Image (spheres, rainbow, N blue to C red):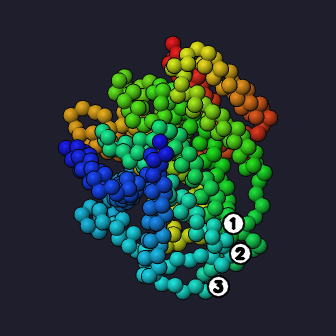
Amino acid sequence: MLVDWVASLYQSVQATFVAHGWPLWVLAVLTAVLKVAGVLVWILLNVLFLIWLERKISGHVQNRPGPVYTGRFGLLQTLADALKVLLKEDVIPAGADRWVFVLAPLVAFVPSVMIWVVIPFSRGVQAQDLNIGILYVAALASFTVPSLLMAGWSSDNKWSLMGALRSAAQLISYEVPLILAELGVVVLAGSLRLSDIIAAQQRSVWFLFLQPVGFVVYFIAALAESNRTPFDLPEAESELVAGFNTEYSGFRWSIFFLTEYANLLGMASLAATLFLGGWSGPFLPPFVWFVIKTYFFVFLAMWIRWTLPRIRVDQLMDLGWKFLLPVALVNLVVTGVFVVL
Amino acid sequence: MLAAYTDVVTFLLVAVLFIAASLFLGGLLRPHHPYPEKLSPYECGKAPIGSGQVRFKVRYYIFALVFLVFDVEALFLYAWAVILRQAGWPALWEGIAFVALLFVGLIYAWRKKVLKWV
């Protein structure tokens, strides 16, 4: 198998390092760079595909074909768009707070790459099995709030600021239920390590069946966290132009777009890991199972986006604070009692 | 132990580098023709009135404060959740007491109409 081959290759390279007395940290850095290169390729390929998929699904939901001209089934459409956006002028408004304006897309994008350190792709295929797995992901996910606020505040545009404030209010309202829903899984598995959580599901059943309420809370909150309809108020085109990214253009704007899809993918793969047993499954290779489960959630999110209308801002806050939060707290306590009994 | 974080730091640096490099490469390709109208903030085609950094509702601060309470609570509960199975009933009671206190806090905020969006 490929995984064994890579492991043996790593060991022979390590032996070479030891034999020549070369410092081992160089090897550690080199492997880390290889890992992040792999993750970047994985994210970019998936985002190219996801954007195409989203346009196809939205097309068919609305009874039209979606992109068809570029390549077979329009598959190359996103690539053409990426090239186009790279060639567009990069406008920074005169009144903008330049540094903050430039840094905001970076603060948004970098965490969406960093969460892939702990996501397990397959048996033993994981950049680093950190012992604080879920906590690490939750901490990185909260970086979205400052990035949007930075973008909105620095643009010197009323729409941007309004959109940024709304999205900050939305994100913090849904972050608490999200974290509490993940806690239910932690209580069952007794560990924050994602590999332990998968192992715990292999011993019993998928946590989807032990944590149905937690799963629903997680899924709704994750939809809200990734700013997707019915929770896409920050970008509500019809009232706020484009929200926090009104003043962004060209490639700088596309970084936000890239981040949105990278986050969707990350959210889906984390959901697959926490609730559907990650890469474990019969017959098919583990990696195939991981992709199937991830894309199940991706499809669900897209389906919901193109079927449901956007909700109002007061309904949004009510749903987060007065429904999801109490439900998540009760779910946590019930799970605790269940585990101790 | 800390060696595990080599990957984390490398991911951070390479992601930053990736964005910087693609912005730089794009800079070689794209046009650059700024003029005052293009650089002014977009307000649906009208000349903008006043600064873009307008005042906003105090409501946002209140929600941020409530969020802070519950986020820190969730952080404490992570440690509790990991050891719950081994620690058994005493830990469970303490956890329930902690969550109950916060629940009372939530109901208080609710009754005081802090959670009402106006």
- Residue A73 in picture, x, y percent from top left: 26, 61
Q: Quadrant of residue B110?
A: top right
Q: CA distance from mark 1 to mark 3?
A: 18 Å
Residue assigned mark 3: B36
The circle on residue A158 is 1
Q: Specify the amino acid type for callout 3.
A: Pro
Q: Residue at x 64, y 52 (%)?
A: A168
Q: Nearer the viewer, residue A171 or B98?
A: B98
- Residue A260 in picture, x, y percent from top left: 48, 56
Badge nearest the viewer, 2 or 3: 3
- From this view, report whether residue B73 is shown above or below residue A165: above
Q: Nearer the viewer, residue A87 or A150?
A: A150
Q: Specify the amino acid type for callout 1.
A: Lys
**Mark 2 or 3 closer to N-term?**
3
Q: Nearer the viewer, residue A55 or B2?
A: B2
Residue assigned mark 2: B48
Q: Quadrant of the N terminus of chain A?
A: top left
Are circles 1 and 2 on residues that touch, CB within 8 Å?
yes
Name the chain letter of the residue that bears numbered label 2. Answer: B
Q: Residue at x 58, y 31 (%)?
A: B79
Do discs 1 and 3 belong to a common subunit? no
- From this view, report whether residue A203 is shown above or below residue A228: above
Q: CA distance from mark 1 to mark 2?
A: 9 Å
Do discs 2 and 3 belong to a common subunit? yes
Q: Quadrant of residue B97?
A: top right
Q: Specify the amino acid type for callout 2.
A: Pro
- Give the class, few, some or many, for how many residues have Cα within 10 Å of label 2's Cα (few <14, many ≥20): some
Left or right of A249? Residue A206 is left
Q: CA distance from mark 2 to mark 3?
A: 13 Å
